[in-house]
Every structure is written in C-alpha cells, then in structure tokens.
Image: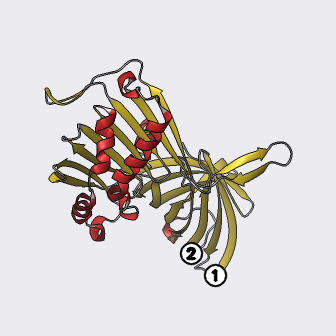
Amino acid sequence: MKYRALLFFGLLYVTINVNGQQINYYPDSIRIELPDQRTVVVIEMREFKNNTQFIPNFPAFIKETSDYVRKSLPDNFNETGPYHIDVRIVPAGEKEILSTGLNNSFIPIGEKTLISIKKIDQPQTQVTVKDKQIIELLPPGWEMIIQSDKYKVKVYSESFQSMASVSNLDFSALSDQLIKEADFTSLGKKSIRSRIVFRENKVDQLTLTRKYPGDNIFLTGYGGVGLFRDKLYPQLSFVLGLTFRDHFNRQNIRVSAISDFMFFAEKSAEGYQMNTNSFLSLSFEKNFNRKTSGAQWAGLGIGFQPSRNQAGDYFKGNTIKFFATHQLAGSHFSVVPEFYLTNDLKDFAFGVAVKFHL
C-alpha cells in the first residue's frame, strides 16, 4: 500500500512539472544586425507567415517614427541623449471609456500610435558572454521599443542619427530570402529563430532554425466520487496521455488513455464487501482558453468494460460508457456526466462523477 501511494503522488509530481511550460505569444524571432548603421533590430512576431510585409516596410516605419521624435524634442536633443522611446500601436478595435457607473459606455478610438520619449538617466553597457567569450558589447545608446498586437520590436542604436539612417535601407531582398529559408509550406506550427547580418544594403549572413513546440507525454492520477444509478462510490483513475501544443507553445489538444477503478461497498452478513469495477477509456479534449496559460479542457470519451472486470451486479455482460469532460481554467474539479450501455449493450443507465485534479 505504501508503494502505491508513492507511485500515485509521483505521477502527480510529473504532471505538475510537465504542464509548467510558458506560453510565448511572440514565438517568431528575427534578429537583424546592421554594422554600417551601428544598429541592432530584434523583431518578435506572433506569426511571421501571416505578416510578411512588416519587415520590408520597417525602414519606412522607422522614418515616420524618427520624424515624430524630431518634432517632439528640442533642437539640441542629440546632445542631451541617449533616450528611450516607447511606441505602442493601438489597434482599431480597442475602445475608450466614455462614462462609468451602472451603464458603462464606450466608443471605438480607431488605430493610433502612442509614443513615449524618456531620457536614459543611467546609461548602461550591455555585455553578452558565451563560452567564456564576449560575443556582443553594446555601449550606452538609443533604444526604441515598438509593440502591437502582432509584433514586438527592440531597436538599439549608437546614436539617433544611426537609428534614423535605417530608413534609407531596402529590406525587400532580406525579406524575400527570409521567406525562402522559412519555407511556409513545411513550417506547420513550428516557430522560427533567425539571425541576419545586413551590410552594404544586402544580406551578408543569414541563419534560421525552426523550433517545434513542446508536445509532451504525461502520466498522472486523480481521485473522485461518482453516482451510478442510486449507488454512490469513490473512484481512482490513472491517466496516460499526449498533450499537443500550438505555435505559441499553448496546450491545444489532449488525447488520453484512462484506467478507472470504481469501488462499490455493499453490506453483507460478514460486514462490508468491496466490489471493484474497472473501465479502460479513451478521451479527446481541446483547450478552449486562448488568452491565459490555464487550460480549459472540454471533450468527449468512450470506455469499455469486459465482463471479467466486473464485481457485484452493477454491470452485466460487455459494457461501454460515453462521457463528456469539462474543466474550467484554474479549477481543480470537473463534473463528468456518463452514459452506460450494459447487459451486452441492451440496457441504458446514467451516472455522473466529480473528479479532483491537481
């Protein structure tokens, strides 16, 4: 009995650790190094294949933003820098609050750009070391952070003139080569990681890797109570399954093999007798929570009980059950309605189980 308890809690430990992976809402990463402009651009995108025009249009975006910065600062701002620039692209669907109270009212504000400019009071030198070698050294300079619902961009430049000079570049060939290397036809749900050195207005180096999201196998167990007809019983389940993640490393599909043990206690002349009935089931579930890391699983399953796995007179002959699963994000409990066909599939019975998950 002691070893069974250790196994049970060990399975729960495995489940907790496997499911702790983080969602990445901007999984595609493209680093563009511009030695001639003394600038580094790091672009993180939700899905590069759905927004390929952003990179060739980026120099024009830098020109537009640089012009706004020039107009917003004193004439001698180059001497007072460096500055940190935050650019936020507000999508057209975002709404502005007009009034609050019992009846809140909102109005769409349309797409707009919010720019925040702040002097860097404590400039920092950033050093990156790999294999005991300095592979990157960035002295204090100008920084720009651009964020929208589709992408995040970080720009580092030695000076404002260096940053503004990016607007004179043509990224069309860079974008075309990147698209060719990414090969969208075979990319699937994989994300991309790319490093590009762009020198003399052409691609000098380009490396690209594809990263498959963290699908995983899990083994766990959970307990609960159930009601079959008018019989209340405790239940113990063991689950072996596969969780498939999407492009954002978000749990998406779960397929499980479940072994359920139902413990029916009956009073007899000698005391109480325990009748154990078991089912082997398969379930298919989908995560309907697309906003946070907590999974909201819902799905269907089917189970089978051969007559040799029966004890007592609860089930007769070969029996199958159908069930629906639903678990809210962050909840440790799920209510599972179950529908049984027993007596060699001739008789119908209804049941329900309440299960506890860690």
**Badge number at residue 141:** none
Give the residue type at disc 1.
Lys
| Residue with the most extreme top position | 122
**Badge number at residue 317:** 2
Q: Would residue 265 be seen by someone viewing this image from the given angle? A: no
First in sequence: mark 1 or mark 2? 2
With respect to residue 13, does 306 lie above or below? below
Residue at 13% x, 26% y: name it. Answer: 132
192 or 197: which is nearer to us? 197
Q: Nearer the viewer, mark 1 or mark 2?
A: 1
Give the residue type at disc 2.
Gly
Q: Which residue is mark 1?
A: 346
Within the image, what quadrant is residue 49 found in?
bottom left
258 or 157: which is nearer to us? 157
341 or 76: which is nearer to us? 76
Q: Position of residue 313 (x, y in %)?
A: 64, 66
Residue at 59% x, 56% y: name it. Answer: 92
Residue at 27% x, 61% y: name it. Answer: 172
Circle 1 residues within 10 Å: few <14, some 14–19, many ≥20 = few
Residue at 34% x, 34% y: name it. Answer: 160
Q: Are marks 1 and 2 in contact (CB under 8 Å)?
A: yes
Q: Would residue 326 be seen by someone viewing this image from the given angle? A: yes
